[in-house]
Amino acid sequence: MTHRVYKVAGGHRYAYEYESFWDARLGRTRQRMVRYLGPCDRKGRILSEPKTRLESVHSAFPVGSLAVFFAAARQLRVREHILEVLEVSEEEASTLLALGLNQAAARVPLLHLASWVRSSPLPRWLSLDAEELSPRSFELALSQLCHLTPQRTWEDRGLLLQQQLTRAWRGSSREPAGAYYDITKQAYYGSHCPYAQLGHDERGTAVVVGFGMVVSKEHHHPILCRALYGGQNDFLSVAPTLEFLQGQGLRHLTLVMDKGMTSKANVAQAMKAGYEVVGSVKGWSKEAMAYASKWPGEELERSEHVVGTSHGGAVYARAFTAPLMEIKRLRIAVVENLSRKAEDRQARDLLLQELEGPVPDERLKEIRAELGEVIVSSVGRRGFRVDAAAVERERALDGRFMLFSTDLDLDGREMYQTYFAKDAVEKAFRTSKGELSLGPVRYRKKDRLDAYATVVYMAYLLWSWAERRLREKYPERHLSEVLRTLESISWVRFGAGKQVREWCTRLTKDQKDLLTALGATESLPAT
């Protein structure tokens, strides 16, 4: 970081900006001047700005998004936490933070990262000796997060750093006790990796690596990010995640799980660990069908049970307590969506009507597959008939699904709102796979993937923290849109006499207001 130095010459006082840097050749810290600030009075107030004679432009670096994320890192004291937890040198801590900033702002491959850092203001901001950086520097920094010990065991110190950073943001936040857990599968492009297995992603079946993320309920700050085996069933990842949350000392959380993760064992383990669970009931067992049809439409579709949705619509949700999944007492909510109810009913009625006329054999197979148990085998020319009782059973379930909660005090509205706020973690993954570029993943070694998960955690923490700061001043604006507004801001190096000086391009009023709201103006040389 920089500091001011004052010099007196000819009875006049002048101000300069200096910075400390590590001289690897001499093996000690030295000082160097960054820029001349101009003449000043005894209190250090600048009397007039220096007039600069521009001779040549050395470089221009787009600095808008990097300044935003660096401001977030400074506010959260990320570099100081890295120093404390990993017990590394200041140079290594700065290199690790540079990895997180790159993941958030640029996504430059490791091979070209040293060049990117040298072109950026990071050497000045982080007191990095940029000339000594190489791809090996970042490999060694990743090894500080996770490595194989001499005893041939894996030491993932990145999880300790995630724990410390979680404590840091929780210390300045009044987050409700809720957390959302989800898993994404990312394509793997390397030749071999223990985590890479045959699984499913948006392309279908492919070789993938899994990532599990837990985020907070309100501001969507990360609590945990970890690499997972690509072929592992989602519900198998829940147990180690619960153990990690317990190890962090996080108590009294309400965990919201997708239906792919809910099982009797997972729910029971969460309850034993002291956590509440809200989830979706999967499948239509006889028990589930009986619960879902507990109330006819006129008893469920009442004003006291209506719940507004995030899309401006409404559903009806009514709760009761009953056994489920071999657990004696769970809170169960029957939810009915009238729009979906009409769609389900119309689709079935149209298929039943189509069956009444002549139907080609191929189409008949399709209709029978869609109607399922409504069509039963029967003697006669057609070999089947419509089961009227089955039709009535399905009509009672049209537009309905069920949620459950281990918290017996929740009503239907609370369960619905809690469960469908889970798009927080889905948004986290959309951001991680989009703006933060979670993939493509090319790391081959297990320790590199584990370390990379912590780098992604850092990047998403910086992103979510900046978004939180933005919403405090501009609740209707989104960070991705704001970063596009800041794209035109550049950090310019130009020749002036015998020196190379640094300046920032002139900001528009909107850019300056946004950077001020995010606390990013302090990092820029002139705003």
Image: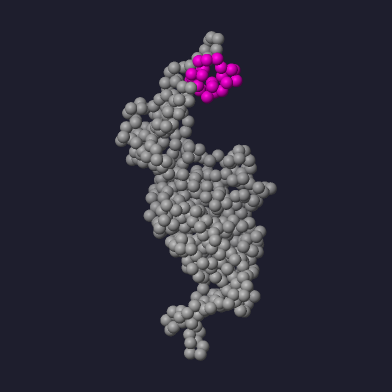
Residue 291, quarter of picture: top left
The residue shown at (39%, 27%) is 293
Residue 414 lies, with reference to residue 37, above or below; the image says above
Instruction: Residue at 39%, 40% (x, y): give it.
Output: 312
Magenta segment:
351-375
Toward the bottom, the furthest residue is 10
Height in image: 157 above or below 398? below
Is residue 232 one of those drawn in magenta? no
Residue at 49% across, 39% down: 261
State the residue in front, 83 or 179.
Answer: 179
Instruction: Name the one closer to the observer, 431 or 217.
Output: 431
State the residue lying farthest toward the left. Answer: 304
Between residue 338 and residue 180, name the one nearer to us. 338
What secondary structure prevails in the magenta region?
Answer: helix
Residue 205 in the image: state x and y as whole percent: 62, 38
The reply to whether residue 153 is visible in this rendering is: no
Q: How is the model colour-coded? A: one colour
- Where is residue 410 drawn, in percent x and y? 35, 40
Magenta span contains residue 365: yes
Does 493 sit above or below residue 231? below
